[in-house]
Image (cartoon, helix red, strand yellow):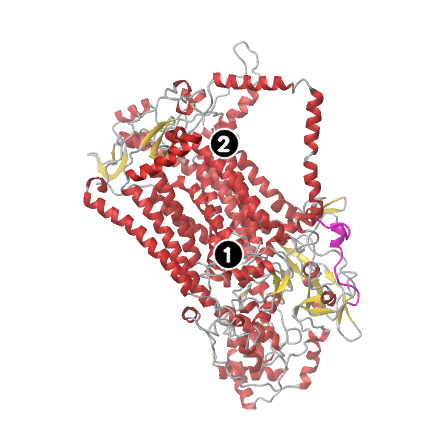
Amino acid sequence: MSSIVNGAGKVVDFVDQRITASNWLKRNIRKVFPDHWSFLLGEIALFSFIMILLSGVFLTLWFKPSMAHIAYEGAYLPMRDVGMSEAYATTLELSFEVRGGLLMRQVHHWGALIFLAAMSAHMLRVFFTGAFRKPREINWLIGVTLLVLGVAAGFTGYSLPDDLLSGTGLRIIEGGMLAIPIIGTYASSFLFGGEYPGDDIIARLYPMHILLIPGLILALVTAHLMILWYQKHTHWGGPGKTNHNVAGAPFYPIYVAKAGGFQFIVMGVIVLLAATIQINPVWLWGPYDPSVVSAGTQPDWYVGFLDGALRVMPAWEFYVFDHPVSLSVLIPAILLPGIILTPLALYPWLEQKATGDTREHHLLDRPRNVPVRTGIGVAFIVFYVLLWIAGGNDFFATILEIPVNWITWFIRIGIFVLPPLAFIATKRICLGLQRRDRDKVMHGRETGIVMVSPDGEFSELHAPLTQSQAYELTWHERQLPSDPGPATDANGIPNPNYRSKRVQARLSRFYFGDVVQKPTVEELEAAHHNGHGSDSAHRDELPSGQQ
Amino acid sequence: MPRSLPGRSRGSWIGRLLSSRRRHPLAAIAVLVAVLFTAGGAYAALAPSTTQNVQAASSTQIEEGRQLFAVGCSSCHGLNGEGQVQEDGEVLGPSLIGVGAASVDFQVGTGRMPLAAPSAQAERKPPSYNQRQIDSLSAFVASLAPGPAEPDEEWLDTSQGNVARGGELFRTNCSQCHNTTGQGGALTMGQFAPNLTGVEPKHIYEAMITGPQAMPVFNDNTVTPEDKRDIIAFLESVQNEPDPGGLAIGRAGPVAEGLWAWLVGIGLLIGMATWIVTRSSKA
Amino acid sequence: MSTHNENPSGDEHAIVPHGDHSLAPADPIADPGLHHDEPRLTDVEPKAERRAERQVAGMFALASLLTVAFIVFYVVVGIHPDDPHDGVDVGDVQVSNLTLGLTLGLALFLVGAGAVQWARSLMTSPEVVHERHELRSDDETRAATLNDFETGTEETGFGRRKLIRNSLLGALALLPLPAVILLRDLGPNTGGTPAQRKEHTIWAEGVRVLTDVTFMPIRAADLEIGQLVNAMPATFEELPEHGPERINERAKSPVMLVRMLPEDLHIAEGRENWGVDGILAYSKICTHVGCPISLYEQTTHHMLCPCHQSTFDLSDNGKVIFGPAARSLPQLPIAVDSEGYLVAQSDFTEPVGPSYWERTR
């Protein structure tokens, strides 16, 4: 043990004498990291990204990003003498002539799917718990950018092997670009080096995929983590855990061991997936040929929502001075990403505007305690999942044995109907959960024991909560809608800000107007005097919000 | 033979384990078709014939076929295979005059016919007749008017097929509906292209020359018998080929992969995360 | 990292509620304070501790064994055929992938699980609480920073020397231009505008229709009712083997020949002579975003695109009947040449593939 300390001591001594490392280390080596499973979603993303980098470097050693046309002479017999690009041929080489090459290809692809899934799950966690609130808006923006870069990395990678699926994906990209008014054909011509598909695109996507995009991701991940480190992690409230402190395990050794261990676990799970489940068998898809297509042509899951939007869009096209404007392509392929990403990126500020809350928040919200935000989040998930199902409508039609046209029509209508329904349902569920929490605090928890009073009345016995249990349900802030104040002041002079304040108050009422508040001290005392929940009539008439 | 099927030249234990090689004994083609030249002439102009191996089927076989037809098929297709249309215009059973022996062998041999009730699409099921009876039925229907005959054994011998060329032909002509390895896929209004796994070479060949149900015809003029043999050899090759990457998850591509990444990948890792944040059991 | 983070008093910057929220009624339940973790079995029972230690070490040891096994499998499970002509045995690749993946994956997993288990069961660190402080700097520091910035700006005279300022801004505004200009040659310099290149394919009058892959000429009599032929122009074979011409034409020129009963057809005015005895030729490139389509249902004459399910009726001039495509499928006028083979009457009469801005009605 002491030899380790001695060894480490020597290193620290060397570094300290040059860059004053101890000063910084002393403050940070025991930095607190709170524990909760949902805090590890971002780590899954980070660790799978590292796995992607490692396996990706391996793949570059064999892969040739060339569209030169060759007759295949490699080891996979069902492709012998078939014409294909060098990119596709070297992908076959990696799969069939390099030991562990197929494994690394599958690690890379499973890693990418998990990277994007983990980023999405992490983002949902941050959204639903309000972790994006001040002071963490910058990290939210970085996160949104990382998600976009992740999708770009994924899509460029999907295109590189030059197989039938990846080429068809590029063809759809080209179709989307052509729909851009005025500059569409030029944009496509510059990207593809002339006519589609040309023989440049793979070589052009390659540096994006292996250098530019991962470089940007790496830089932004670094910034993301530095900001996280500086601001300290959010945590859940509870006994002793407040907005002014952070409780958890020290960075060294607990967090180092756990996060370091988790890195290996994530890598292990990805490699095990790659060992046992086949992914993107390009040798079955065949080389890309723009005149050939296969049934069940779909993109990877993270582009599925865009493809789904393309599938369910009605055939709208109109002419402006004899020039076609294809809304059926323009809206889903070009406008939809912006329509989704802009409010997503701006959400922290939108909510700030609505609630008028500009304070720092380090305690997370339980999703039920902000029913409107939770409702918005669930509505978005429903919207996204519907588009994703649309992206696999033929797949689901085959699985469910129903006409693909039905699925398309279901999504066309559902995309407008179901998200609002999801919002309303989620909000009501949240309010119900809040009411239950409030009941528990006021009357104790239900024991399931039913008592019969002498005059034949049935009632359930309620057991009081411990202080800790009650505190767990009441540590959150009381959220009240803001009051616009009077339109005129005492002297009858109109308040110049009244109009904007009224708008803000209305939004704030939308967010907090019907939140079920935790009981006040007085209410709690009154409930206790009323005899511990035997008075069921009392529990039914809960005040809905406190104006 | 340079183009032998992969995995066949040097068998590996796992290859043998995982790829149950369906070597269906090719049913002997007993029947060749008698031709009614006079009735067929007008029709032949519209439907140019494919290879018609003209040989006389014995009249007893045709007679047996006629009896089987009268019992099992005539309720929809009419006593003489002329087809039946209901009063409301709905086709109860299409005319079978000129569909040929290949069509009967395919429809009955794959169990699609007889159909219990008219539906969007007849599906493959165990055949209701034995091969001898199917041959008789084929002979009877072929005797009505000339049509595509059953293929020669020579074109069903996949060991002579060129798998790579078959793959190119398959991807150009077939994969748009049947997917890249014949898993099938969705068509419009509830119709679908069926999965080709385990279908006998003869039936694949017959489907191409007769165009059953929604499937278009690929006759021997534009997709030659050699081409068809290559296509069947390719299908046999990829369907017998082990999946080197592990579980194939239906060879269904990105949608299935996405589902697995979320349900298994993220699911497992979140499970691990919930374990990591706990401490070991209390004293 | 700034020092105020470590400011021990921190009172003046501690986070205090303000605004409407401070009006909230007092919290009903007082904070009972942090409760500390109860001791673990491994903290009190030496036996349990030793068992946990063995567990963790066991995982690490097993990981080493698996790493060695990985190397063994790498060497033992070959995938290279003795004679390169034979090709790979896919079954071998499967064994290789499975053994390498399982050993490496489990080794990684066990190293991770061992480390985590070590932390969970044996590391003795208590739960720690750190105070947070408001992130904004104190007013004094902010004022001083602003002051420094203003002093610096004053010293440059950036606000006063408008000539320098504006000329600098002008120069900086122009500098990105070379970066954009340099990208010009990403696209070709010859061959007209991108739109012009889309207007033509290698179909022309008298060009024979060949079966794709096998490139055989096709007679009208070769096609039956219900037939589908995926076809290419004979001129395709004349294109150079190397370079992008062939693949570019594959993205524009492929057609589908179908034969229908003439009485089933609803031929539009002006197209009466575009077919031969019910044989029609349509572009294979979808007018939505350009996927090749040839999912043809001979019973309904519907042509479905597998990418986005646009459905075209080939008996009705390629009209769209379902899905996102807005334009009919272009039809190639065909005829029969002196030897009886199917040929094109001309190029397509409209550009094939997706809509684009320059494509007039």
Q: In what quadrant of the picture does the C terminus of chain A appear?
A: top left
Identify the main secondary structure in magenta.
loop
- Whether residue A420 is situated above or below residue A243 in the rendered picture: below
Counting from the top left corner in percent of width and height, residue A299 is at: 55, 53
Q: Which quadrant, please, contains the N terminus of chain A? A: top left
Is B62 or B165 nearer to us in this picture?
B165
Closest to the observer, B125 or B63: B125
Q: Please report, as a chain letter, where disc 1 is located.
A: A
> Could you tell me if residue A537 is visible in this image?
no
Q: Earlier in the sequence, mark 1 or mark 2?
A: 2
**Which residue position is annotated with label 1?**
A396
Query: Would residue B190 appear left or right of C170 to someone viewing this image?
Result: left
Position of residue C53 relative to residue B109, above or below, is above
A457 versus A198 height, above or below: above
Residue to which mark 2 is pinned:
A137
Q: Name the residue at the top extreme.
A: A491
